[in-house]
Amino acid sequence: MDTTTDTAHPHRIPITIAVTLATILQSVDITIANVALPHIGGSMGATLVQMDWVLTSYIVAAAIATPLSGWLAVRHGRKNVLLVSVIGFTVSSALCGLAHSISQIVLFRLMQGGFSAALVPLSQAVLLDINPPERHGRAMALWGQGVVLGPMLAPVLGGWLTDSYSWRWVFYINVPFGILAAILITIYMRETGKRKSTFDLFGFAALSLAIGALQIFLDRGSLKDWFGSREIWIEAALALLGLYWFLVHTFTAREPFVSPGLFRDRNFSTGNFLMLIISMVLFATLALLPPLMEDLLGYPVLTAGIAMAPRGAGSFLAMFLGGRLIGRVDSRILIAVGLTIAAGSLWTMANDFSLQMPQWLIWGETLIQGFGIGLTYVTMTTVAFTTLATHQRSEGTSIFNLLRNIGSSIGIAGTSAILTHNTQVVHESLVSHIVPYGGQLRLHAPFSFTSVAGLSALNAMVTQQATMIAYNDDFKLMGLVTFAVVPLVLLLRPRRRRSGEAAVVME
């Protein structure tokens, strides 16, 4: 029997704690291992290529398994799938910590990524189900805080655990929280209805090929000089081929793996596209700021982590306010305001960030940007599912989070590639203005054309300036992209109050 309803669940609080823990665990583990990679490689004698697969295996497995979580929840029940995912994630995390070879840790990371795939989308679906419609905004605010909090906490938490204890604790930290989440799910969560559903093997295989090849393409592109490598060409071709097969099959098969009916809902379709763009900006900025502060400005890792705190504070504040404004203010206005604030902050960063900037400027702009993205994130997450049928939520949340993950991968890979390219271009341009005699730039000590030390110092200074300009170019591009999608909010439909439904009451 399907117990999914639009009324408040009697055990809402313990279930909310359980699924929020699951969300944070998954979002933290996407990036927490990055900080520990040098220590893992050193203790296991692994090469850089082998270490890259520690990250790639998790990302690819999670990406491929994410769309599968919706079908599994429909076929076997949401509680069963979520419980197995939490237990599997916890066990594989412990195995990662216990690994004694690089092949073992890659295998266990593959398992960890596969089990983690269902945590975020099913947690989102559960929160929508256990809360009545008037509380969906606040429920999605809490869910969004977990998604955003993870990547922000991960670098600082990973660095602290690695330096204070061991890289193995980067994985062990998941175990007690995973056990707590599993206990709460077992005791308090009710099972949803199950229904027989034919598994579309070809559709799943085609989608898996497209997603897997795309993720490897994005993850290894910078290492292989992008299209200068035959491997990258093969991965790009496989991704396009898999996508073509998947789309043709989806619109011609009787029971496709992903129901096209999902995308007939205008809010869901528009929300997915906007979430793709928002994720590109959100995660790309998260990836760009730490190396900017550490490599160019010379901030210690902990200081860089603290400098990112205002961004998290801004996101939390916006999600808290947004969750309570949804239902009182037109959601389209909230999303447009959030996107405009985020775009304006990125534009300011592109024009004001420099090698001499004070730390308060970073705090201020990240605070403003976090507020804009947080307001957009929580409102868009809520609006995307307001008009979607209850029985479509499991499948809908899996697709929604798949596109969120793809957006983050595209954003990080794209901005990193542009950063590298623009650094080289700007470096060449700056160097062309430096000549030893009668040039446009007058040099002073310690820069000298007559000594190796002087030339090295000069080259380091030019590289710093070129890299800073390239960072500014990335921020400007992301600002333009964010602002360009603002008109798309007009495609959204505000939720209409159902007959007999009371006005939204904010406690």
Image (cartoon, rainbow, N blue to C red):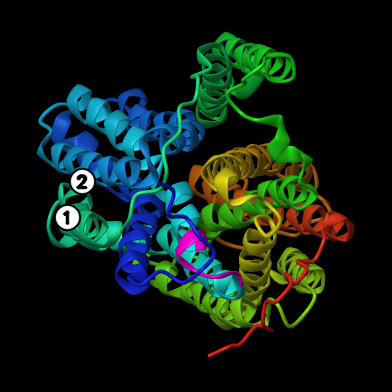
Is the stretch drawn in magenta largely helix, strand or loop? Answer: helix
- 295 or 233, which lies in front? 233
Residue 234 at x, y percent in the picture: 59, 10
Viewed as shown, does residue 506 lie left or right of 484? Answer: left
Viewed as shown, does residue 338 lie left or right of 256? Answer: right
Residue 151 at x, y percent in the picture: 44, 57
Q: Which residue is mark 2?
A: 90
Q: Which residue is mark 1?
A: 179
Q: Is residue 132 magenta?
A: yes
Asked if disc 2 and disc 1 are in contact, CB closer than 8 Å, the reply is yes
- 125 or 206, which lies in front? 125
Residue 358 appears in the picture as rendered: no
Above or below 360: residue 104? above
Give the residue at x 62% y 21%: 256
* Helix, strand or loop at mark 2: helix
Span of residues in magenta: 128-133
Density class for disc 1 (Cα within 10 Å; few <14, some 14-19, many ≥20) is some
Give the residue at x 21% y 60%: 187
